[in-house]
Amino acid sequence: MIKKMTPVLAVEQVEPCVRFWTERLGFQKTGEVPEGDTIGFAMLQKGNIELMYQSYASIRKDLGGQAPDLERDMRKGPTFLYVEVEDLAQVAAAMQGATLALPERLTFYGAKEVGFRDPGGHVVVFAQMMGHA
């Protein structure tokens, strides 16, 4: 029934978020839509993982005043992404200098996790499954 799901994160500026994923984690920018002299919308991909960012200005333009409640709600954030990885130490090294949101911890369900904020303020928790605790 469901074929694919891709998060679209709303931010003030798309460019720093694109750099966060491409420079730190090896994602590729697969598409973008300009909004004046900035990027209004960008698509990022690595393997079968896809992520999109859209600026508030671009959202406002897209909605054309048709859904003011939706535009307001998109500003409430942040969004939380949970990303399972093979090697948490490798990801933590790539995140050096990024804003820490959740210190490394071991959960009751057997995951070692650490969380960072992307430049748009969204929280990305990386998790390595360690087996059941």
Image (tube, grey):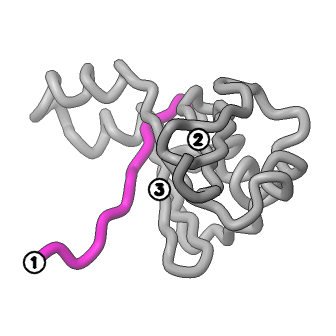
Q: Residue at x 31, y 39 (%)?
A: 61
Query: Which amino acid type is marked by label 3?
Result: Met
User: Given contact means CB atoms under 8 Å apart, are the residues at marks 3 and 1 in contact?
Assistant: no
Specify which label sits upstream in the sequence, 3 or 1.
Answer: 1
Q: Secondary structure at mark 2?
A: strand
Residue 30 location (% of width, % of height): 57, 74
Which amino acid lies under the numbered mark 2 shown in the image of this protein?
A: Val
Query: Is residue 62 in view?
Result: yes
Give the quarter of the image for residue 102: top right
Rendered residue at 10%/77% (across/down): 1
Where is 112 relative to 34, above or below?
above
Q: Which residues are magenta?
A: 1-12
> Which of the marked residues, 3 or 2, is nearer the chain's N terminus?
3
- Left/right placement of residue 88 relative to residue 133 reads right
Give the vertical position of 47 relative to 106 (above or below).
below
> Which mark's residue is nearer the viewer, 3 or 1?
1
Q: Position of residue 93 (x, y in %)?
A: 89, 49
Q: Amino acid at mark 1?
A: Met
Residue bearing the label numbered 3:
52
Q: CA distance from mark 1 to mark 2?
A: 28 Å
What residue is pinned by disc 2? 125
Circle number at residue 21: none
In this view, the residue in front, 19 or 115, is 115
Task: Name the residue carrying label 1.
Answer: 1
Q: Earlier in the sequence, mark 1 or mark 2?
A: 1
Distance, label 3 to label 2, CA atoms, is 17 Å
Instruction: Report the predominant secondary structure element of the magenta stretch.
Output: loop
Q: Is residue 40 visible?
A: no
